[in-house]
Amino acid sequence: MAIMETDGCFADGIEAAAGCSVGHRAMRIEDYGKVAVTFVNTCTGRAVHIAPRPDVRERALSFSGGESRAYFAQLRAYQCMPGDELLIIQEVRLTVPVEKIVSQPRIRATCDGCGEEIINEREADHEGRILYRACAIEAYYDVVPTERSIS
């Protein structure tokens, strides 16, 4: 499983290179706005965090063969740079058990707040009530009252 720390093209690259995808429940997005990924062995729980070195763009210039355009210099350099010049790779320990991250598919609950279905053990127990996380904590949206619902 891959846990992405950003969305966008980096996530697409990890999906293509590692074969992990959100649709197959083998990729999670924890959008911290950081180009980084943690690969987790779901059988052992062992995890490795990989991120580019903070100065990788500057390091790339010495591997670019004299290319002056930044994008093309980086493109060329990233193909031949040694891994330790390009990436920081660290073994990490998950703070949430891998079984909880993966969860169980097809388990369903109903939110005591909004009445919507919650799947894959993503509910929160809040003061004895089963709630969808947005009802328990904070939602990224508010429902706009209308005269009729949108179907």
Image (cartoon, rainbow, N blue to C red):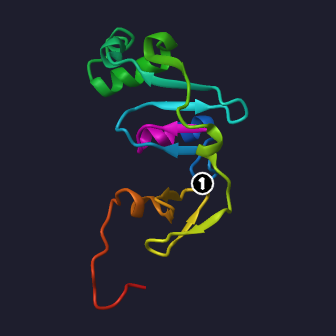
The N terminus lies in which quarter of the figure? top right
What residue is at 31 percent from the left and 74 percent from the top?
143
Against 8, residue 72 (above or below) is above
User: In front here: 75 or 57?
Assistant: 57
Q: Amino acid at mark 1?
A: Gly
Residue 24's x, y, as percent? 64, 51
Single out the residue that lies furthest toward the front.
127
What residue is at 33 percent from the left and 59 percent from the top?
140
What residue is at 51 percent from the left and 57 percent from the top?
125
User: In the visual, does 39 lie left or right of 145?
Assistant: right
What residue is at 55 percent from the left and 37 percent from the top?
96
Q: Mark yes or no: residue 26 visible.
A: no
Q: Quadrant of residue 108?
A: bottom right
Q: Mark yes or no: residue 144 visible.
A: yes
User: In the visual, does 25 lie left or right of 138?
Assistant: right
Residue 2 is one of the magenta-drawn residues: yes
Q: Which residues are magenta?
A: 1-13
**Residue on which the image places disc 1:** 23
Label 1: state its secondary structure: loop
User: In front here: 78 or 121?
Assistant: 121
Residue 80 is one of the magenta-drawn residues: no
The C terminus lies in which quarter of the figure? bottom left
Residue 117's x, y, as percent? 55, 71
Label 1 environment density (alpha carbons within 10 Å; few <14, some 14–19, many ≥20): few
